[in-house]
Image: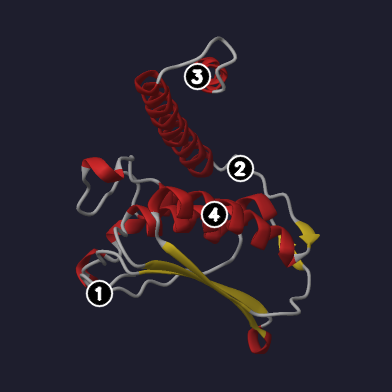
């Protein structure tokens, strides 16, 4: 798959020759589907490692700006592709964070991917709050999408579960399962608020 994606990248850059409009569209579609497949494979491997207890924690201390920059890069990409508005509400003067940065980034990126995936119009809001009273940080991802029925709240964190899956939101239903497992490793918590037709 990596070799295939590398070749598609080269073709997309027209290093091997000029592509006409139809060929460029076809190559871009193949690359998008390959990236989607790569994400599925990565999710399955991550969940397998978590359940086998072989995922190490790499704890370090780093500035909050690292996480914000990572989220902005993901949001900018989705904003270009979906035309959804992205709204930011970020507190200032965060102290350095001490946790596993790469796992925190994956948690937040998975939540953002879901927000964009299930929202066809409106906006995605990202809020980051410095909770001084509990010496913690609260990350919130909100959307104006289809929402989730209350009886399905617990199901969305089960592996290989997708609520109301369609061809437009292909996947294997592991994103939020990985979020929950990683948060357990990092001693974090996750909460869901949602209403059908009004977002999550």
In space, the residues marked 2 and 1 are separated at their CA atoms by 34 Å
Residue pictured at 74% horizontal, 55% vertical: 59
SS at badge 2: loop
Q: Which label belongs to residue 8?
A: 3
In space, the residues marked 4 and 3 are separated at their CA atoms by 23 Å
Residue pictured at 25% horizontal, 66% vertical: 148
Q: Which label belongs to residue 55?
A: 2
Is 147 or 59 nearer to us in this picture?
A: 147
Q: Earlier in the sequence, mark 2 or mark 4?
A: 2
Q: Say which residue label 1 marks.
A: 195
Query: Could you tell me if the residues under marks 2 and 4 are in contact, i.e. CB atoms within 8 Å?
Result: no
SS at badge 3: helix
Q: Position of residue 44 (x, y in %)?
A: 43, 36
Q: Earlier in the sequence, mark 2 or mark 3?
A: 3
Label 3: few (<14), some (14–19) or many (≥20) C-alpha neighbours in 10 Å = some
In space, the residues marked 2 and 3 are separated at their CA atoms by 31 Å
The nearer-to-camera label among 1 and 3 is 3
Q: Earlier in the sequence, mark 4 or mark 1?
A: 4
Q: Is residue 2 left or right of residue 169?
A: right
SS at badge 1: loop
Q: Earlier in the sequence, mark 2 or mark 1?
A: 2
Label 1: few (<14), some (14–19) or many (≥20) C-alpha neighbours in 10 Å = some
Residue pictured at 50% horizontal, 19% vertical: 8
Label 4: few (<14), some (14–19) or many (≥20) C-alpha neighbours in 10 Å = few
Q: Which label belongs to residue 76?
A: 4
Q: Position of residue 144 (x, y in %)?
A: 33, 69
Q: Position of residue 167 (x, y in %)?
A: 23, 40
SS at badge 4: helix
Residue 18, above or below 149: above
In space, the residues marked 2 and 4 are separated at their CA atoms by 30 Å
Residue 4, above or below 150: above
């Amino acid at each position: 798959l990596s070799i295939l994606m590398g070749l598609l990248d080269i073709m997309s850059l027209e290093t091997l020759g000029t592509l006409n409009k139809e060929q460029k569209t076809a190559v871009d579609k193949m690359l998008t589907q390959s990236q989607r497949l790569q994400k599925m494979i990565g999710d399955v491997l991550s969940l397998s490692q978590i359940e086998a207890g072989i995922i190490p924690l790499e704890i370090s201390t780093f500035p909050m700006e690292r996480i914000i920059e990572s989220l902005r890069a993901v949001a900018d990409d989705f904003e270009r592709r979906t035309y959804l508005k992205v709204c930011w509400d970020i507190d200032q003067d965060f102290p350095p964070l001490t946790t596993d940065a790469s796992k925190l980034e994956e948690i937040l990126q998975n939540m953002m991917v879901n927000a964009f995936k299930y929202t066809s119009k409106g906006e995605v809001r990202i809020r980051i709050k410095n909770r001084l009273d509990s010496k913690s940080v609260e990350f919130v991802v909100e959307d104006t999408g289809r929402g989730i029925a209350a009886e399905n709240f617990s199901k969305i964190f089960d592996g290989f579960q997708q609520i109301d899956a369609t061809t437009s939101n292909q996947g294997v239903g592991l994103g939020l399962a990985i979020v929950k497992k990683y948060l357990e490793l990092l001693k974090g918590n996750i909460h869901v608020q949602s209403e059908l037709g009004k977002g999550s």
